[in-house]
Image (tube, helix red, strand yellow):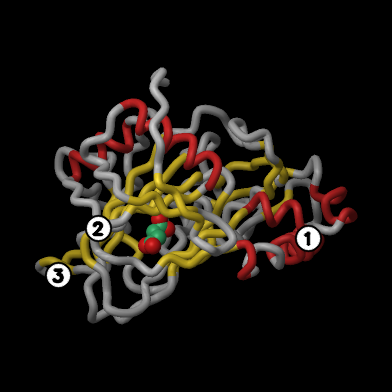
Amino acid sequence: MSNTIARLDVTPTGGGVGAEVHDIDLRAIDDATFDAIHTAWVENAVLLFRGEHLTPGDLIAFSRRFGGLDLAPIQENGRRFVDGIPELYVVSNVLENGVAIGSLGAGEAVWHTDMSYLPEPPKASMLYALETPPAGGDTSFANMYAAWETLPADLKTRARGLRVKHDGTYNSGGYLRQGVTPTDDPRTSPGALHPLVCTHPDTGRRMLYLGRRRNAYIGGLETAESEALLDELWSYVDRPQFSWEHVWRVGDLVLWDNRCTMHRRDAFDPKQRRIMHRTQVKGELPPA
Ligand code: SIN
């Protein structure tokens, strides 16, 4: 961290999470500005920057300021993405010569935390818009601090001390991950067990840590009991007062704290083009 304090122009999104940072060129920030961005990210959980002009190299360089980067997951058709840039994940429905250039197609992507099926999921993700459809493909973010704080006391008591399976079988678009045998048995599906209630390492705040609904399983419970408790907990996630929906424009970069938010995406017309670049910053600690 630098000794100089930079001032940012930050305004809340007006939704249940996030803020917009104005008038920053992410290609040309100094250390003091980065420190201020980092502080704003921890405080607001999701940050929007508009009007950026980022090559893949610029996006990687900005992402690396937060820490080491995860390699992009393998694409649904088995390819890793951009040659020479294994940290860059392409989210797109576009086909070139009949081959998808990215993942997740044009369908809905359900609520999820990125790569939480790993023992140490990424702490941050960012998504940069290169091409956007005229309608749809909007991305929503849910505030998992707020979800925890709103739970009734008896539900908080039941959730404390339990661990939940974050499934690694399917991605958020419903596609089977590479090398995984399809299953809808949450007890045997691959994935990591994480505490249902975690404390954020930077803010010290508690949050509900659910990951994704499909094939989720609360360790040690009968399947029916696990399903019923998960349904109850998930009913606190999709509430408009705790979320913010972002309608993309080309040049937008959204940076989110992958520990205390979840996100989802609306479907869009598959005849329209949508191309986004995503990077992920390695987590430093397992969720606890
Ligand atoms: C993602 O889930 O990482 C992608 C979301 C989106 O396409 O907006």
Asked if residue 77 can be seen in this view, the reply is: no
* Position of residue 139 measured from the top left corner of the image (x, y, whole percent): 43, 65
Q: Secondary structure at mark 2?
A: loop
Q: Secondary structure at mark 1?
A: helix
Label 3: how many Cα within 10 Å (few below 14, some 14–19, many 20+): few
In this rendering, which labeled residue sits more in front, label 3 or label 2? Answer: 2
Chain-order first, disc 3 or disc 2: 3
Q: Quadrant of the N terminus?
A: top left
At label 1, which amino acid type do we have?
Leu
User: Is residue 60 left or right of 117 when viewed as pictured?
Assistant: left
The circle drawn on residue 251 is 2
Label 2: how many Cα within 10 Å (few below 14, some 14–19, many 20+): some
Asked if residue 129 can be seen in this view, the reply is: yes
Closer to us: 18 or 221: 18
Mark 1 sits on what residue?
229
The circle drawn on residue 98 is 3
User: Is the residue under label 1 in contact with that under label 3 (CB below 8 Å)?
Assistant: no
Label 2 and label 1: CA atoms lie apart by 41 Å
- In terms of image quarters, where does ligand 1 lie? bottom left
Label 3 and label 2: CA atoms lie apart by 27 Å
* Position of residue 70 measured from the top left corner of the image (x, y, whole percent): 37, 36
Seen in the picture, residue 83 relative to 252 is either above or below; the reply is: above
Q: Secondary structure at mark 3?
A: loop
* Position of residue 115 measured from the top left corner of the image (x, y, whole percent): 47, 46
In this rendering, which labeled residue sits more in front, label 2 or label 1? Answer: 2
Label 3 and label 1: CA atoms lie apart by 43 Å
At label 3, which amino acid type do we have?
Gly
User: Is the residue under label 2 in contact with that under label 3 (CB below 8 Å)?
Assistant: no
Q: Quadrant of residue 266?
A: bottom left
Give me the residue at 73% from left, 60% from top. 233
